[in-house]
Image (cartoon, grey):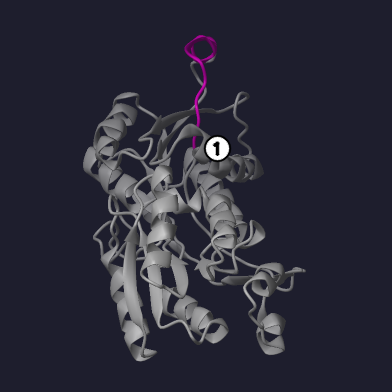
Amino acid sequence: MRRREFITLVGGAAVGWPLPARAQQPAVPVVGWLGSDSRESEEHRMVHVRQGLKEVGYSEGQNLAIEYRLAEGHYDRLPALAAELVRRQVSVIALHGLPAALAAKAATATVPIVFEFANDPVQLGLVSSLNRPGGNITGVSSLNVEVTAKQLELLHELVPDAALIGLLVNPNNPDPEIQRDALVAVRRLGLQLHVLHASAERDFEAAFARLVQVRGGALMISPDALFTSRSGQLGALAFRHAIPAICPYREFAVAGGLMSYGTNIANLYRQVGIYTGRILKGEKPADLPVQRAVKLELIINLKAAKALNLTVPLTLQASADEVIE
């Protein structure tokens, strides 16, 4: 059951109209969505983006057109796709993920950009400051990088006998912050870390098999766009392989994973739409503060815990936002 509210703010938007419809309504603003994933996976995000746009008065097909430019998992295509949106003269480029943000920034200094990713945009040089981004870029930082240590602590609490913890990362989008924080956390707990790679959906089975082969006792899944859009599938795999695992997103726990701890992606992408709509109404990215997630949610799947012969302390259950029984 749901026990706490979760709040976040962000920026972004996206999808596509056929050319004939666009020709009939030339005055309609066009938003470009720069995505790293497939159309099917991006659509899970767009449901929430459209909701945010609607809240500020924009509905796709009525007074707004949205065009996709999707890398289909090939991050090296993002610079060319970003350049296409610039040439298309879209009103705003909305996106998720650091690789897409870097590609968009390199493509334009004038078209407004709204991002969503888990890293620090100031440290990366994307904005001047969180309160006054400056330039043409703003968005949201979801904090999922910063919760790495807490995720490992939660795993250790429920699986204290696991001496080797796996960390699933996408080698096409390596995040040194996550790996560094995970390594520091496991050393503090007296554990070992084994990094597993998956750059496409077809690699998931092999990654789980590798963790079993090296006798890994638990698994943490990093907040990469590839894993975000397939959280449910990863949760089902963790359940089938009987691996205690944690992921940043609720869909993972719902599908059979042991726990999720991180931001609420529905709220993130809804706010992507809100920020994009505000820019369409005339606000400038330079004046819109980069938002940080102010709350995180913990979801525990008791059915998964029982199947793994794990006991979830009542105190931990009481602190969860949702317990799946």
Q: Is residue 298 above or below residue 274?
A: below
Residue 325's spot in the image, x, y percent?
76, 69
Q: Secondary structure at mark 1?
A: helix
Q: Which residue is more in the foreground, 284 or 151? A: 151
Look at the image and say whether residue 275 sits in the magenta stretch: no
Q: Amino acid at mark 1?
A: Glu
Residue range in magenta is 14-24
Residue 272 visible in the shown view: yes
For image coordinates 71% across by 68% down, the residue present is 303
Q: Is residue 45 above or below residue 313?
A: above
Furthest toward the front, the residue is 213
For image coordinates 52% across by 68% down, the residue present is 245
Residue 270's spot in the image, x, y percent?
58, 49
Instruction: State which quadrant residue 25 falls in.
Output: top right
Q: Residues within 10 Å of mark 1 (few under 14, many from 20)?
A: some
Position of the N terminus by quadrant: bottom right
Look at the image and say whether residue 22 sits in the magenta stretch: yes
Residue 281 visible in the shown view: no
Residue 263's spot in the image, x, y percent?
54, 64
Q: Label 1, on which residue?
A: 43
Question: Going by the image, does 127 lie left or right of 249?
Answer: left
Q: Is residue 313 above or below residue 291?
A: below
For image coordinates 67% across by 87% down, the residue present is 313
Instruction: State which quadrant residue 81 falls in.
Output: top left
For image coordinates 35% across by 76% down, the residue present is 182
